[in-house]
Image (spheres, rainbow, N blue to C red):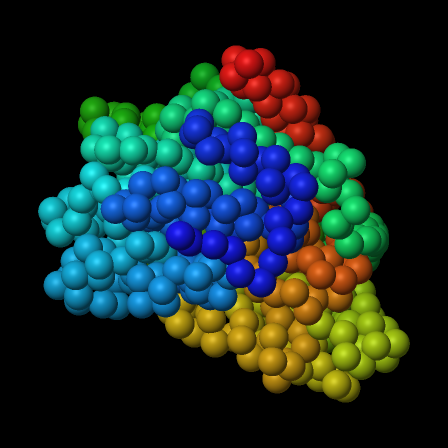
Amino acid sequence: MFNLLNFTPREYQESIFQSAKEKNTLVVLPTGIGKTAIALLLILERLNKFPDSKVVFCSPTKPLCNQHYETIKNNTNIEKEKITLYTGNLSPKTRKELFESSKVIIATPQTIQSDLENKRIELKNVSLLIIDEAHKTVKNYSYNILASIYKDYSLHPLILALTASPGGNKEKINEIKNNLFIENIEIRTEDDEDVSPYLQEKNVEYIKVTLPQEILEIQANIKKIQNEKLSELRKFGVTKPIHVINKKDLLVLMLQFRREIDKKNPAGFYGVSLVSQLLKLSHALEILETQTIDSFKDFFDKMRLEKTKASQNILNHPEIKTALIKLENLKNRTHPKLEKLIEIIKEQLESNPNAKIMIFANFRNTVAILALELSKINNAKVIKLLGQKEGITQKHQLNAINQFENNEFNVIIATSVGEEGLSINTLDLVIFYESVPSSIRRIQRSGRVARIKPGKIIFIIAEKTRDEAYYWKSLKEEKKMKNILKDMQDDSQSKLI
């Protein structure tokens, strides 16, 4: 008989577990209040109910898999050798043997998918499939394929999907539901009576900074050429007002122009170059408004090395030439957002020398610049946390997190890799260096703090820029998501009665 060790489930965890025992269930809980505990309860229930079966627990990254491995090992009486951290680092032969001999397999979905496709393993005796960070179950992600194979081949299929943030619209949430064959939704928010006693206080501060006149002038130069190029889209039948054309619209146009090239239409080449210029100009504006002056300079330095027509057209435009002359005059200036960040870190470490701080920034280049500048602050020991797209292995990511948790560093600067479910319990402060338009990413970032003690979140916002627009967009999307999920939960539970 398998049992829990070292903790007692809370009332809401027990309630959700009871609901998830018989139906494929999507669980939406605020970060840091024990989604994994519900998984533990269900793992034990299924292994006791079907003694010859096993459980597969999928999580999107190796650091997350490692966390779940430690949790299951330390909080159940399942034999340690029967709990397997199943990674691509193991040889295929070893993985096959471990899969057959284990009761609980913790793995990335890609590793399981690869072994299924190569017929090394089968899911016939898997009585529970756990999908962590279930908001990823969209498009062609491995979770979709796994869930479909599992549903068709398992003798006793049951799916438990876990997330803090499935998405801000009904279509996205329905896509996750359909891909995972969800029949039941369990949601709890910070406002629910059975959850609120366990939440730590989370103070949110919104700090606006004003862009100086010199940056506003460069912004005006870029916007002038941007509007010029947007107006040229009229030649191609684009009727949407230019002030509301966004990146998504431009990417759709890019596909259309590439199709014209395939049809040997010379206008397609002009269209592709025009859209490329607009995408580059939009990115330049984003960097200027929301990142650092050095990031903006680096962007144009890299553009000078490109030989594409789009890059050369931008660099040769009089407005850009004027903007780059003005940029030279900003050489020794610091972007107001970076000034504010330095001020916040100094104040935090002066008032609390033991403070642990996490800063999120979207771009690797910005992370490097922030790390360089913040390292100059007295008592600031800074480490970077970058993703695999930036060439960093998951082993290095885990090392960075462990070093931070062990107090070798007190400031960690992360790209989006830091958003995904990582349990860094010691954090005092999370800083959004820029806003994100996605409610999922906002919730994930915010969830890194106030897990076991009170914490603070600071948004640094450049006034009258996309920073402000993204802040309000993600907030509105989060509220909408909660309302949609509550309606879906009521609907799914009424069908269970």
Residue 170 in sight from this viewpoint: yes
Q: How many marks?
A: 0
User: Residue 331 at x, y = what percent?
Assistant: 69, 72
Residue 149 at least partly seen: no
Q: Choose between 13 and 429: the one closer to the eye.
A: 13
Of all residues, the one furthest to the right in this rendering is 351
Please indicate whether residue 433 sits to the left or right of residue 68 in the image.
right
Q: Residue at 54% of width from left, 54% of height from top?
A: 421
Q: Nearer the viewer, residue 50 or 440?
A: 50
| Quarter occupied by residue 356 | bottom right
Can you say whether 257 is above or below 8 in the image? Answer: above
Q: Is residue 376 left or right of residue 61?
A: right
Q: Residue furthest front?
A: 1
Residue at left offset 35%, top offset 61%: 83
Left or right, 449 with reference to 209: left
Q: Is residue 89 left or right of residue 355?
A: left
- Residue at x 49%, y 66% (from the top left corner): 74
From what the image shows, is residue 337 above or below residue 317? Answer: below
Assign the C terminus to one quadrant of the image. top right
Residue 224 in the image, given as x and y percentages of width and height: 64, 40
Q: Residue at x 31, y 62 (%)?
A: 82
Q: Quadrant of residue 335?
A: bottom right
Residue 158 image position (x, y, % from top left):
37, 34
Please, is residue 386 above or below residue 224 in the view?
below
- Where is residue 136 drawn, in percent x and y? 44, 41
